[in-house]
Amino acid sequence: MHIGEAAQQSGVTAKTIRYYESVGLLAEAPRRPNGYRDYSAKDVETLRFVNRARGLGFSVHQVGELLELYRDRQRASADVKAMAQARIEDINRKVEELEAMRSTLLHLASSCHGDSRPDCPILADLAAPLRSGSASR
Amino acid sequence: MHIGEAAQQSGVTAKTIRYYESVGLLAEAPRRPNGYRDYSAKDVETLRFVNRARGLGFSVHQVGELLELYRDRQRASADVKAMAQARIEDINRKVEELEAMRSTLLHLASSCHGDSRPDCPILADLAAPLRSGSASR
DNA sequence: TATGGGGCTTCCTCTTCCTGGAAGGTCAAG
DNA sequence: CTTGACCTTCCAGGAAGAGGAAGCCCCATA
């Protein structure tokens, strides 16, 4: 099938499929006599795999590793599980970071009356010189 | 003072200070006769402001807006509060997204025995054709 | 047969936010 | 005089594509 159909069936845009190929995540697709890339149902399956893994936040590089494990009939499931768990830890760290930001922002926003007066503790805090209890991270 | 000292006092690297200047976030610094940039205590204060705002996750562009508000003695505090709240909503969306990923990953990881056997539901799920209840997002 | 509309190809630029490095000027100390 | 530490500019890269231009290819229709 053409790249457009593979895109539609996998949920990965044609543009992105070419990009994945260009960076080596996907093998070069075989070409029809007219130069068009030709995809099989198996390729669509791979694309879907990639799309799901990306959706879970794995980097393109990590997806490459997952694909390798996927194709390796001898792999140990522990390897895959380790990747999933590492990803979970990443997420945990990111969530914590975001929650720290949010908590600071909530605190600042609540202390700002938010009307037409120029007086604003949010700006005052951002501008404050080094000081404990401020909004730095 | 030289850029290095400004960097040290503000927590923004010299490299990054030059970058901020190059993209217009900061005004061009005045130069000494030898061509070196010259910074004042006021500039350091601005750099610290920028650094804190970036630490709260505001984009460079948004920090520019915050700086404008900061310098505008006539600003309405409501404008600043609105930016803080918009940022909070951004964070909320991101956290939700991350938590959805995490929940899927936790589910997958727990269903994988994680030993030396090749059998792995994580890969199986990623590879699965279109199906409800899978790990797509 | 000419034409039109998609779809395909490659290549280049833009985005965000820096970081690293190369080549070269400056300054203070030993 | 020579280090070595700073400073300068400029260029490249990285993550993960999106957007768009220029140019084929294929099919259908008037």
Image: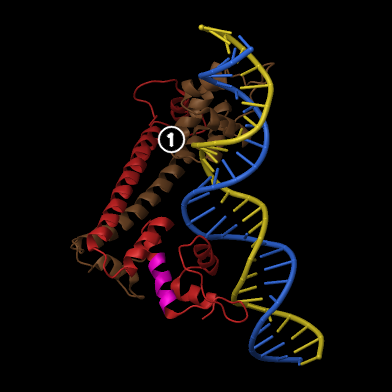
Chain colours: A red, B brown, C yellow, D blue
Give the percent coordinates (x, y) of residue A36.
59, 77
Give the percent coordinates (x, y) of residue D8.
64, 27
Left or right, A2 with reference to B86: right
Q: Main secondary structure of the magenta part?
A: helix
Left or right, D25 with reference to B135: right
The magenta stretch is: A42-51
Q: Nearer the viewer, residue C9 or C13?
A: C9
Q: Amino acid at mark 1?
A: Gly
Q: In the rendered image, which residue does mark 1 sit on?
A: B55
A136 vs C4: above or below: above
Subunit of mark 1?
B
Give the percent coordinates (x, y) of residue A61.
42, 56
Q: Residue at x 44, y 40 (%)?
A: B57
A76 vs B53: above or below: below
Left or right, B86 with reference to A95: right
For the question of whether residue A137 can be seen, the reply is yes
**Magenta span contains residue A48:** yes
Q: Nearer the viewer, residue B93 or B74?
A: B93
Give the percent coordinates (x, y) of residue D20.
67, 62
Count of numbered tags: 1
